[in-house]
Image (tube, helix red, strand yellow):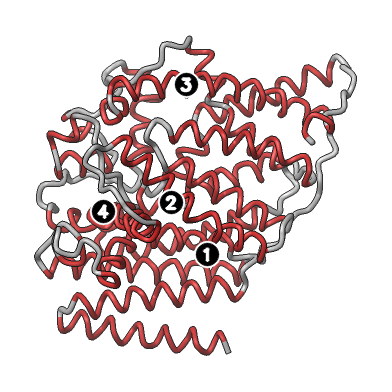
Amino acid sequence: MLQIMRMSILLITVATTFVGVILEQEMVLFVSLLLMLTHNAMYGLEAFQKRLLFTFFHATFFIFLVSRMSVVILFDYRADERGIFGTNFYASWVVNEMLLMMIVALAGLFLGTMIAERKLKPTFSTNVVNNTTLIISITTVMVVSFALRMVYWMESIIAARNLGYFAYFANFETALPKPIELIGEMFPVAFFMYLATMPTGKKLYIPIAMYLFEGTFAMMTGSRQAFMLNILIIVIYILFRRLISTKKIIGGLAVSLPAIIILLNVIEQMRNKYATETSSIFESVLEFFYAQGVSSNVLGYTVSLSDEIPDKIYTIGPLIEFLMFNIISPITGTMEELKGQTVERALEGYQYSHTISYLIMPDLYERGVGYGSSFIAEWYHDMGMFGVIIGSFLVGVLMVIFTKMFSAKSVLTVTAALLMMRMTLFIPRASSIAFIIDTFSPVNILGVALILSLYIVLKHFEIPHYRIEGALK
């Protein structure tokens, strides 16, 4: 029955999209967008266990790209402050193109996932790693890096308060010695490597608390994304392993969501003196969705500023920059790495988030303000609407692959899967290949190398296998 309803919704979506495009009616296209989201959500729920990443991805897709328009249209919230549907645009053709981009992207995600699942049958590993020496090595690096990372965040919080949050993002450099900073940055990969050993429930309490605590400290610098992503990936991990029932997880999220949203709004007001103050929980919820949905404007500016955007390839921009500044430049000595938020960084670099932010608001950009990016905007710039369908299709395929990777017996494979899953959730407002760059960063590679080196040393010298169960309970 659910499948019949879903297919009916899909047919209606195709019809309303066709009508919206022909008549150039943004409201019809918005209805089509909501219908396509509903269809994909139902598709995720049909096989929730193997489509966890697909389902949660659509939650972040909605929050970052659709939520502002939704609260403006459905609740008339701050409807008169900006352009059509709360966007920064008054031209219907721009908004229509934005909406069509999102509809096409959702269609591509569905097709990519559906086709990939026919070739790959995701299963889930419950094998607990019994290599005590490896677990000791991972835990040691995790604990030490956590302590050093907290020192870094305390320094960052003080700097953010003194400099101002936007100036902090643009100019902050830690005074910690480079080795200390580097080891501290290894905490996330060490944590995910620990999760990849599939520890039993009680052994997860303290590490997960550490991870969420670290995300909370990061949030105090004004960056809320890490905290949100940390919560989501933990929920996905717990559901993958069936450590807690789905009903309890969903119930817990429903109960805690208003408090989380209020906290995120408080952080926004701390860092932005122009942020809207709210007077009720319901208004806080509306303001959260209104503020987070600002990334839809990136799609609109991609259309309206198309003649001003440099003719570069942005979908793999971070990879191009990595090769230029970390491989080619050290050999040739011809290029200096672009840092901070400067005109040169925006116009000469290959990261769309910098380029589009500068073109939208040059003065604010140089003061540390940014719009972020979106995988949809990058594919649209590079290849038009055809690029959107291709890019989204690939994301759908990759989500199935990441889910399949979670069932691997290799700790390193599961670690990579978790890291890529986490960052994939963010690409509606980040770079198309952010999940690759973030996962295989030099810091993560060095972190894994450090853990494996410590493991080899402990095993070589036959250091006794001290039990760590008590410390992790």
When asked about the image quadrant of residue 369, the answer is: top left
- Residue 21 in the image, given as x and y percentages of width and height: 20, 79
What distance separates the C-alpha of mark 4 from that of mark 2? Answer: 35 Å
From the viewer's perspective, tell me whether residue 72 is left or right of residue 325: left
Task: Report whether residue 447 is seen.
Answer: yes
Q: Name the foreground residue: 467 vs 439.
A: 467
Mark 1 — residue? 55
- Residue 425 in the image, given as x and y percentages of width and height: 47, 52
Mark 2 — residue? 261
Number of the front mark, 2 or 1: 2
Mark 4 — residue? 382
The type of residue carrying mark 3 is Met
Q: Name the foreground residue: 321 vs 92.
A: 92
Question: How busy is the neighbourhood of tag 3: few (under 14 within 10 Å), some, or many (20 plus)?
Answer: some
From the viewer's perspective, tell me whether residue 471 is left or right of residue 226: right
Q: Name the foreground residue: 424 vs 90.
A: 90
The type of residue carrying mark 1 is Thr
Question: Which of the marked residues, 4 or 2, is nearer the chain's N terminus?
Answer: 2
Question: Which of the marked residues, 1 or 3, is nearer the chain's N terminus?
Answer: 1
Mark 3: which secondary structure? helix
Marks 2/1 in contact by CB < 8 Å: the verdict is no
